[in-house]
Amino acid sequence: MNKINSLILSSTNKVYLHGDAGAGKTQLACQRLRYLVSDPEIANQGILVLVPQRIQVKRYQKVVADIKASHNIELSIMTMSSLVRRTVELFWPLISDRSGFYRPFEPPSFLTLETSQYYMGRLVDPLLAKGYFSTVSLSRNRLLSQLVDNLNKAAIIGFPHTEIGEHLSEAWVGKESQKRVYEDAQEVINAFRSFCLQNNLLDFSLQVELFKEMLLQNPLCKNYLTRLYRHLIYDNAEEDPPYVHDFVSDLWEYLHSALIIQDDYAGYHSFLGADPKSAMRFKNIANDSIYLQNKDDVSEKKSELVNAFIDFSKPVHYKVKDIHEFITPLNHRSRFFPEMLKEIAESIRTKIDDGVSPNEIVILSPFMSDATIFTLKNELSRYDIKLRAMRPSSSLNDDSVIQTLLFFAVICHPEWEIPIDPYHISSTIAYALSSFDLIRSHFITQEISPALPVQFPSFENLPESIQNRFSDEQCAQWNTTMAWINANLSVYPLDIFFSKLFGELLSQPGFAFYRDLESGSSTAQLINSFKKFRHAFGYQSDIDQEELAKEFVKNVQSGLLAATFVPDEQDDDDQFVLITPVMSFLGLNKSVDYQYWLNVGSSGWYERLEQPLTHPIVLSRHWQPGRKWTAEDDLALSKETLEKFIRGLFNRCRKGIFLGISEYSETGQEEKGLLLLHYQALVRRALRNEKND
């Protein structure tokens, strides 16, 4: 370890550090950063800490915050996407007149995933009416997201966006009609790129192309970047696409020191272009290569267990009770899914009663439905245990807090004339006003005129027979709500409206958001999303702001994705149990004491999502042009994905994994996926081993 520390704590060495997750690689990177920042001479030379996801930035920021440095520190901690945007924005005047933009002397507007899908939708909707994509059974939002994803893949992998349809068609082995879908996709992608060039819009793919093909080829920009950064720490390189590795390779000869960190058996975000094979190039050009692993008895036993779990041919040298010391089903196999959720809640209560901190427990599944989260929240609330859900790629409109905010926005902007389903009116009133229930909310809904715009009656205007059904408290709360609505009709910009609605009404005693910290986070997310949406229209000086606000609300209600939103402050709150999809948890790069796996029999643990308009493997650098994608390729990918997930989850669990198994899944199906079969095979081999003894 002393040798490793001497290599890590060096301002002149270039090191490639790899190993299993949880072996302490990021901890060593933090030590190196502390060493670099503490030295006045080094800190002034320029330090870049590169991470694949924003959520990983905070750990390195804490390191710097703990150092009381009196000297100047030239430090950047960011993702490659942030670096690309900053560089394009800074050097825009240098390339704008040579990039094909129609208005090169005007500033560009940077698009988020949300706003990219919005503009893509404006182009797609007329084509859908003409019969484009008629054989594709996807929701509009998923269709848009896959079209945008194709553009991004072309940019980060490094081939012209005009060849996307050709790449997909060459690999297809099914019906010829699917190739027409790829032609439709190519036509829309070409139209979208032309639209962006006409209106100075920079989506992610265009930012990356400008950065790679123009800025890095420009001596002035390249000299700026190579002088700006002399020391590099690059964590989780395997989760980045190859264009990031290309950039680091270009910087390599100019760096005084570098530390590249890679998790073995990872690359969980391959569906977004992550390329572990590309990241391994640094092993060959670094001065030193270090393999880091845990060597304690527990880790060695866990390593043997995970190898046997993954590979049916591996012998089992222990008994069933030894397996159950680390991975075990709950006390009994439930018949139905809700019963299993109740048992999980009871098990979590027992753990917390035994002294386990709630933030050392995580509930995982390939996908998280609203019903599952709602049920677990209710079950855990019986024991005063709080549950925090994290679904970064879910729709904004899936959140009940955001649905409530949008509801009041529609009511306070009658000129929008956006219809609201009567049931939604009743359920939102019952949710937002704590003293109300669905029955009394329904009485009010019945008195609303079906004509647009939606207008609520005042309490005094309700029939006396209905008034008699309300208590004085409910009457006062309704009058308070109506008074606030009448005082805020079409007065403020939408982001300010949301802020006032939260602060002046919904977070007050008697309303839904009172003392609810998660509602504040959701409100901030919605406001942030609208600001980015509005910023994308910056090039249109004459745009009507009210029309823009209406467009935003309509698109969120239709299911516009929340992009990859991560709160700026992602605290590990000791008071919350986390529930999140497996992929999201693996991206957090953190370990916990206990994991609970849901839907163990589901094929979602390993099967590729239905993506009729794109393909993450075909659109990669490692796919041979012209080769066909077959069923054998699908099977191999499923096995590789399952192995990655199992190893990743085992390495991020310190004490134990509990399997939530029910005879029938959440949808009422009997599921016997590979993960469940692997566990059952492991137990059978252990039983045979016991008999042989």
Image (spheres, rainbow, N blue to C red):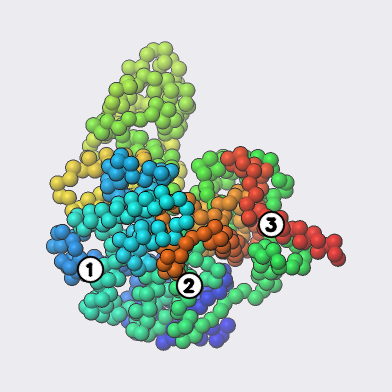
* Residue 351 in view here: no
Residue 442 position within the rendered picture, expressed as x and y whole percent measured from the top left: 43, 23
Which residue does the image show at 27% across and 71% down from the upper left?
213
Report crowding for label 3: few under 14, some 14 to 19, many 20 or more residues within 10 A (C-alpha): many
Q: Which residue is rendered at x = 35% and y = 63% of the image?
A: 154
Which residue is at the front of the view, 585 or 470? 585
Q: Residue at x 41, y 44 (%)?
A: 135
Q: Position of residue 163 (x, y in %)?
A: 33, 62
Spatial CA distance of label 2 from label 3 is 29 Å
Q: Where residue 663 sits in the image (x, y, percent)?
A: 67, 43
Q: Amino acid at mark 1?
A: Leu
Q: Which residue is mark 3?
A: 679
Q: For mark 2, what is the residue? A: 277
Q: Between disc 2 and disc 1, whose residue precedes?
A: 1
- Identify residue for label 1: 90
- Pick out the residue farthest to the front: 176
- The answer to which of marks 3 and 1 sits earlier in the sequence is 1
Secondary element type, mark 3:
helix
Using the image, determine if residue 415 lies above or below residue 272: above
In the displayed structure, 12 sits above or below 336; it is: below
